[in-house]
């Protein structure tokens, strides 16, 4: 891809991200779960926006897992255990400007299957 196309993709994702974040806000008992995916790895964190604190996080790179649907499911199960350790059973899902399909959808569905109410 050319630099012009890459720049346009970044601009469009930033617009989608701002649109979603204007409506999503996490509090201590119902934090915001933010997902970030790079070309190789998937990351997620539960954020309390009122205090500006990360309550729980998971790093696909440290787990040695990549960025595909099967690995997203494994990362989500690890994240569920971290959330349960922090006594979090309900959250708001922030897709961070990514389209809700593929890896992002698999991650969210696995969270729901393991008892996190989104």
Image: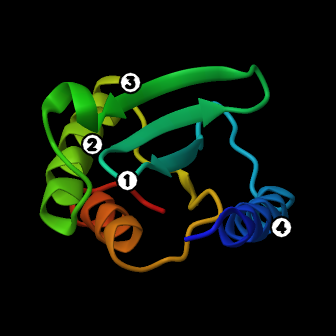
Q: Which residue is mark 1?
A: 39
Q: Which residue is mark 3?
A: 86
- The percent coordinates of residue 114 (x first, y second) are 21, 57
Q: CA distance from mark 4 to mark 3?
A: 29 Å
Whether the residues at callouts 2 and 1 have beta carbons within 8 Å, the answer is no
Which is more N-terminal, label 3 or label 4? 4
Q: Residue at x 56, y 23 (%)?
A: 54
The image's mark for residue 80 is: 2
Which is more N-terminal, label 3 or label 1? 1
Give SS at disc 2: helix
Q: Please count the marks in the image.
A: 4
- Mark 4 against mark 1, which lies toward the viewer? 1
Q: CA distance from mark 1 to mark 3?
A: 29 Å
- Mark 1 against mark 3, which lies toward the viewer? 1
- The percent coordinates of residue 46 (x first, y second) are 51, 36
Corner quadrant of residue 117: bottom left
The image's mark for residue 19 is: 4
Which is more N-terminal, label 1 or label 4? 4
Lateral position of residue 26 relative to residue 19, left or right: left
Which is more N-terminal, label 2 or label 3? 2
Q: Residue at x 82, y 66 (%)?
A: 15
Whether the residues at callouts 4 and 2 have beta carbons within 8 Å, the answer is no
Q: CA distance from mark 2 to mark 1?
A: 23 Å
Q: Residue at x 29, y 70 (%)?
A: 106
- The percent coordinates of residue 71 (x first, y second) are 16, 55
Lateral position of residue 4 relative to residue 46, left or right: right
Corner quadrant of residue 111: bottom left
Give SS at disc 3: loop
């Amino acid at each position: 891809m050319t630099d012009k196309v890459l720049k346009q993709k970044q601009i469009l994702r930033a617009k989608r991200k701002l649109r979603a974040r204007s409506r999503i806000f996490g509090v201590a008992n119902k934090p915001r779960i933010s997902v970030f995916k790079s070309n190789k790895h998937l990351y997620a964190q539960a954020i309390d926006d009122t205090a500006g604190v990360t309550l729980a996080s998971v790093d696909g790179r440290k787990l040695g897992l990549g960025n595909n649907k099967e690995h997203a499911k494994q990362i989500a199960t690890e994240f569920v255990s971290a959330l349960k350790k922090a006594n979090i059973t309900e959250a708001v899902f922030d897709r961070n400007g990514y389209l809700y399909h593929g890896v992002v959808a698999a991650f969210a569905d696995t969270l729901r299957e393991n008892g996190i109410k989104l």
